Image (cartoon, helix red, strand yellow):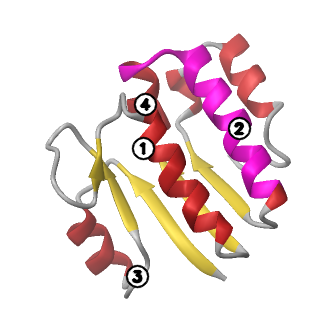
Amino acid sequence: MRGYCVTRDYPLKIRTKYDLGETPILWLSNIGKEGSVRPKDLEKLSLSLEQFLAEGDGIILLDGLEYLITNNSFLTMLRFVQSLRDQVTVGRGILLISLDPSTLDPQELNLLEKEVDQTLS
């Protein structure tokens, strides 16, 4: 399957470390460079992911949810994840979210876990 990576880490570092070849990488950063999206610009992020999913089966790795939460709010990000989950389901894709559970309070973690099919510790 095709992949799409959304991350807080610098794309060149990720591409080299994991040998990702041509896999698109979107950098969550306030730098404002090409290939990046500002953490408060959820509309641009959502549109980018929607366009990727429109091309058919694909895997999205969302790494940096904590960063998005600190720049928006937990409820805003929960709504974003809910919407993204629906898009992934319709597009027959897979959504992988990397998150340190200790960064959320138990209620928030519970709400987020209800939006995913499986969690790994």
Q: From the image, state whether disc 1 or disc 4 is nearer to you.
A: 1
Q: Amino acid at mark 3?
A: Leu
Residue 90 lies left or right of residue 70; in this view the side is right
For disc 4, the marked residue is 68
Q: Is residue 52 magenta?
A: no
When asked about the image quadrant of residue 77, the answer is: top right
Image coordinates of residue 52 in percent, x first then y, are 57, 66
When asked about the image quadrant of residue 105, the answer is: top right
Q: Which of the two labelled residues, at mark 1 and mark 2, occupies the earlier sequence position?
A: 1
Separation of marks 1 and 4 at Cα, in angstroms: 13 Å
Residue 114 lies left or right of residue 44; in this view the side is right
Separation of marks 1 and 2 at Cα, in angstroms: 14 Å
Q: Amino acid at mark 2?
A: Ser
Label 1 element class: helix
Q: Which of the two labelled residues, at mark 1 and mark 4, occupies the earlier sequence position?
A: 1
**Which contiguous range is marked in magenta?**
71-89
Q: Which of the two labelled residues, at mark 4 and mark 2, occupies the earlier sequence position?
A: 4
Label 2 element class: helix
Are discs 4 and 3 less than 8 Å apart at CB? Answer: no
Name above or below for residue 90 compared with residue 13. above
The answer to whether residue 100 shows anywhere in this view is: yes
Residue 83's disc is: 2
Name above or below for residue 98 compared with residue 107. below
Q: Which of the two labelled residues, at mark 4 and mark 3, occupies the earlier sequence position?
A: 3
